[in-house]
């Protein structure tokens, strides 16, 4: 598709927004409007306002180490909270089902252009409401109900939408799951064997809980040998990919998907990216890109959320900027530092380390379960998530592991020294819990909480304080 913006339709407004001859309609200045909107919320709905204010404070004061989480720049939040939320623009740029979409078209084209620039993609679909919606669109576009797909097993770090029976992707399709080795690593020979045995129409690679790099080129070889499409879901590592710190799947996979609120520091939402296969014929009429557009709208979604599309455009501009390279480097350095420190402190890590922003702590045998660790750490101001580790037999709500990530640490400018200290704080809490009769002593909780507060004050959320 063409990425050049169309000439604007002739603008009936004069220089200061006045329509010649018509009565002047007062239009608020955007920046003043934001303050007004918040004041209005406080005055009209103090219950909701207090909840929002408390959540804001919580984010400033806690050490967010959930690997799937990040923090968007206030300029991204401004897009999400903008008047674009009022805009209905069913369809695609230049092809809408409503009048009044000229500005929507420009915004969506800008988001597409920036997505392509950030990832070196040929084409992008920016309307998916989430990473899950993006995956659902791809799967419904390429497979018919009952067709088979091959994805990483949920227990081994895969995502629900990669064929879990709890998801439509495992219910309406014949899903097969490949597993990791006892060390927690992908086993490409096993994947190839399963692909040749089950002959899936689609192979899904990418993960939610896998700390090592993924060889997308190798996955494509396997897909070609098995005559399957390859979907690469880079939801967790999209920032590292964009920064060139992880191999990019964009030209290896037939289709690449990602969430936008994790390592892209954007809004809730998803993206579909196409590389060299964008213009190949799809399974039915038109190109692969056209097939996937139809799969998003009208097949699995209705109207797009233009506020979210604008927020994606804003986030992607940052991802494509030179400043992002520094954040990406801190993502990887911080995770390395955390892994090294936890190993020094005697903890066991899935795969023994990390190549990404993620560290998976294997707590089995330590006497501490994931749920207890998660709760104790939260009491200290450190937010993590319990996670099953490969071979885990503990119940899903208990789990034998913890997943840590550096997205928010990196955004706050925390370098490897600070990241290592964060790992020490986590280790201090876990060590206390693991001691015989282990619990979290009040003095330890207070000490960690105080230090967390100091670290957060020294590294404020980026751009949040005027
Ligand atoms: C988080 C995640 C998703 C889902 O994204 P949502 O936007 O939360 O729906 C999809 N795939 C993987 C691998 C993920 O980690």
Image (spheres, helix red, strand yellow):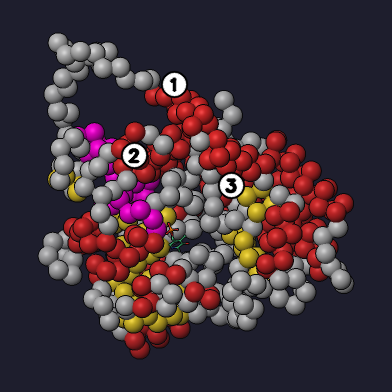
Residue 270 appears anywhere in the view: no
Horizontal relation, residue 163 to residue 404: left or right: left
Of residues 444 and 239, which is closer to you in this image?
444
Percent coordinates x, y for residue 195 in the rendering: 36, 82
Percent coordinates x, y for residue 297 in the rendering: 23, 56
| Residue at numbered disc 1 | 32
User: How far is disc 3 from disc 2 in space, using C-alphas?
Assistant: 27 Å
- Identify the secondary structure beneath mark 2: helix
Please say if the residues under marks 1 and 2 sit with CB atoms less than 8 Å apart.
no
Horizontal relation, residue 27 to residue 189: left or right: left
Q: Nearer the viewer, mark 1 or mark 3?
A: 1
Of residues 423 and 164, which is closer to you in this image?
164
Q: Quadrant of the image for the C terminus?
A: top right
**Image vertical order of residue 428 relative to residue 454, above or below:** below
For this orientation, the residue located farthest to the top is: 21
Q: Residue at x 58, y 47 (%)?
A: 408
């Amino acid at each position: 598709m063409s990425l050049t913006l169309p000439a604007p339709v002739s603008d009936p407004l004069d220089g200061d927004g006045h329509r010649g001859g018509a009565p002047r309609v007062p239009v608020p200045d955007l920046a003043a409007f934001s303050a007004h909107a918040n004041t209005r919320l406080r005055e009209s709905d103090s219950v909701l306002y207090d909840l929002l204010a408390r959540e804001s404070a919580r984010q400033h004061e806690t050490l967010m180490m959930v690997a799937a989480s990040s923090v968007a720049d206030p300029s991204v939040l401004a897009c999400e909270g903008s008047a674009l939320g009022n805009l209905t623009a069913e369809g695609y740029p230049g092809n809408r089902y409503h009048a009044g979409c000229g500005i929507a078209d420009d915004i969506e084209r800008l988001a597409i252009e920036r997505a392509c620039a950030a990832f070196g993609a040929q084409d992008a679909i920016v309307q998916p409401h989430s990473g899950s919606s993006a995956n659902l669109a791809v799967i419904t576009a390429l497979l018919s109900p009952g067709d088979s797909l091959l994805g990483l097993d949920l227990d081994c770090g895969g995502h629900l939408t990669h064929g879990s029976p709890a998801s439509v992707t495992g219910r309406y399709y014949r899903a097969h799951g490949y597993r990791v080795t006892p060390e927690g690593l992908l086993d490409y020979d096993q994947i190839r064997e399963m692909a040749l045995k089950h002959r899936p129409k689609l192979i899904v690679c990418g993960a939610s809980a896998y700390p090592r790099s993924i060889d997308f080129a190798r996955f494509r070889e396997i897909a070609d040998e098995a005559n399957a499409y390859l979907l690469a879901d880079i939801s967790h590592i999209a920032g590292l990919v964009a920064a060139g710190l992880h191999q990019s799947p964009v030209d290896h996979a037939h289709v690449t998907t990602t969430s936008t609120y994790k390592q892209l520091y954007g809004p809730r939402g998803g993206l579909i990216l196409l590389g060299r296969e964008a213009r190949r014929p799809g399974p039915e009429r038109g190109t692969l890109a056209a097939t996937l557009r139809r799969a998003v709208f009208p097949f699995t979604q209705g109207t797009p959320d233009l506020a979210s599309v604008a927020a994606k455009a804003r986030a992607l501009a940052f991802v494509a900027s030179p400043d992002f390279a520094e954040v990406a480097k801190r993502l990887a350095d911080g995770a390395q530092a955390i892994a090294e420190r936890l190993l020094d402190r005697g903890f066991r890590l899935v795969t023994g380390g990390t190549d990404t922003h993620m560290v998976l702590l294997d707590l089995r045998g330590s006497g501490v379960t994931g749920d207890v660790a998660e709760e104790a750490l939260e009491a200290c101001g450190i937010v993590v998530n319990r996670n099953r580790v490969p071979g885990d037999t503990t119940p899903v709500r208990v789990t034998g592991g913890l997943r840590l990530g550096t997205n928010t640490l990196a955004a706050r400018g925390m370098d490897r020294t600070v990241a290592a200290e964060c790992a020490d704080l986590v280790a201090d809490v876990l060590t206390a819990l693991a001691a015989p009769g282990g619990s979290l002593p009040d003095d330890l909780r207070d000490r960690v909480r105080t230090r967390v507060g100091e670290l957060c004050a020294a590294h404020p959320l980026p751009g949040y304080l005027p």
